[in-house]
Amino acid sequence: MPNTLSNADDSSSRLSDALKNVADRLGDIPTELSYQRSEFRTLFDQNSAILDQSRAASMLALDSYIISNPRYQNKKCVNGAYGQVYSQNNEDGIIAEIFSRIGHDTKFFVEIAAGNGIENTTRLLLDLGWTGVWVEAGEAEAASIRSVMSAPILDGRLVYLQEKVDRDNVAPLIKSAISANPDFLSLDIDYNTSHIWSALKGLAPRVVCVEYNAHFPPSVDYEVPYDPNGTWNGTTRFGASLKALERIGREANYSLVGCDIFGVNAFFVRNDLCDEDKFLAPFTAENHYEPPRFSLVGMRGHGRHAEYASP
């Protein structure tokens, strides 16, 4: 999911931070302007309360939607699974639910575009005793990963590669870094995601999590033309539609078993592990599509724990 999503929760959070920054500087206002200072503090408190109520209402509405919709109450459906420790869009819960049904083998993961190491789809797996590889090219993200994940990097539980991937270098890069065939592969590079997945068909993870472009209708097969230097520009032009990913997955012997409820990620299970007793059929984009609900994305409860702690 693009980290710079322009959504309501993100906007309200940024507004709240801006208001707090201004409030912190009110002490610099001269005494003769104390009336204005008091007036602003009142306005600040009122707006903060409104923002908090708005976030709470959004979360309550989402919970009510999940509970009242028979689709999500179907035990074979994974889309509404709860769980958010380090993930952005409840991926933690969906990943746990899928593996509870199919089991695991190597407990090895690969995440391409691992972000800052605090918020991603595999940090929880590492906490739970898995090992794996992270790939992330960003300088700020690299500094964060090397800081907060220094312990598992040092003892070899986590291999970190600061590399920019393309469809030509990604397969040899990953194969040179993995010590076992991964059980889980996560891809979210905003623009060329589908092309990178196509280049990794030599891997055979049990589960694949791939970002999709939910702006496209579920019946439309579309992916952006490959551009090794392509980056997301903040518009609807990025990645691939869910139908395109369904096709790519089918060609690689994977079945689409669900999407997170926010319309960000699609989840695929290898065909030899997937059947109608475990997951909701048909395994099509039309059946599992979730529309963009980016405005509902937000961290519930306490903030994430940054520094890695041994399980």
Image (cartoon, helix red, strand yellow):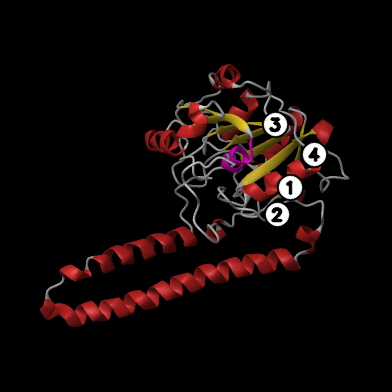
* Rendering coords of residue 136 (x, y %): 48, 32
The Cα–Cα distance between marks 4 and 1, rounded to whole angstroms, is 9 Å
| Residue drawn at (64%, 27%) of the image | 198
The Cα–Cα distance between marks 1 and 2, rounded to whole angstroms, is 7 Å
Residue 285 in view of the camera: no
Task: Give the position of the N terminus as an image quadrant.
Answer: top right
| Residue hosting label 2 | 81
Whether the residues at callouts 1 and 3 have beta carbons within 8 Å, the answer is: no
| Residue hosting label 4 | 102
In the image, 221 versus 87, the foreground residue is 87
In the image, 29 versus 69, the foreground residue is 29
Numbered label attached to residue 183: 3
Marked residue nearer the N-terminal end (1 or 3):
1
* Rendering coords of residue 148 (x, y %): 44, 39
Outermost residue to the right: 277
Marked residue nearer the N-terminal end (4 or 3):
4
Q: How many residues crowd mark 4 within 10 Å: few (<14), some (14–19), many (20+)? A: some
